[in-house]
């Protein structure tokens, strides 16, 4: 088991090692009555990763990318690994994230 804090700022790669971004945050769906993680929020450019490091992504999530949680195949010791063919989609939000 890992803590969220251990995962933040890890690279996100495909199984073959293609870099997709840096994990900055998680999207959670609270509508089920229990918080359920549904997606990874990633910075696809190193400059964005540095800019958001340790900061909330609320309100700025549209500048970042999203990878659906179902694409995650495993957590490596130093990276988050997703299925081959996974792509980063642009975040879709209405105004500020979480509203």
Image: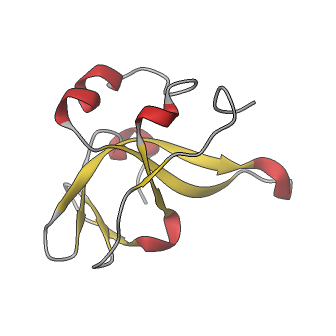
Residue displayed at 26% across by 49% down: 21
Q: From the image, which quarter does the N terminus lie in? A: bottom left
Image-quadrant location for residue 82: bottom left
Q: Nearer the viewer, residue 37 or 83?
A: 83
- Measured as percent of width and height from the top left, residue 80 is found at 30, 60
Determine whether 94 is above or below 90 in the image: above
- Is residue 18 left or right of 53 when viewed as pictured? left
Give 75 or 96, whichever is nearer the viewer. 96
Color theme of the render: secondary structure
Residue 20: percent from the left, percent from the top? 25, 56
Please tell me which residue lies in front, 14 or 79.
Answer: 14
Which image quarter: residue 8?
top left
Q: Residue at x 22, y 38 (%)?
A: 45
Q: How many marks?
A: 0
Q: Position of residue 33 (x, y in %)?
A: 86, 53
* Residue located 79% across and 53% down the image: 34
From the viewer's perspective, tell me whether residue 16 is left or right of residue 65.
left
Look at 52% across and 45% down and name the residue there. Answer: 91
Give how far across and how far down residue 73 sits, in percent. Answer: 37, 76
Q: Quadrant of the C terminus?
A: top right
Residue farthest along the left direction in this orientation: 17
Q: Is residue 92 left or right of residue 66?
A: right
Residue toward you, 6 or 17: 17
């Amino acid at each position: 088991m890992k803590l969220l804090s251990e995962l933040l700022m890890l690279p996100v790669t495909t199984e073959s090692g293609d870099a997709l971004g840096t994990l900055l945050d998680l999207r959670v769906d609270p509508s089920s009555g229990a918080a359920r993680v549904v997606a990874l929020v990633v910075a696809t450019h190193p400059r964005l990763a540095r800019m958001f490091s340790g900061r909330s992504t609320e309100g700025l999530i549209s500048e970042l990318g999203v990878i659906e949680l179902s694409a995650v195949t495993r957590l490596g010791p130093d990276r988050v690994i997703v299925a081959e063919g996974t792509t980063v989609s642009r975040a879709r939000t209405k105004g500020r994230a979480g509203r």
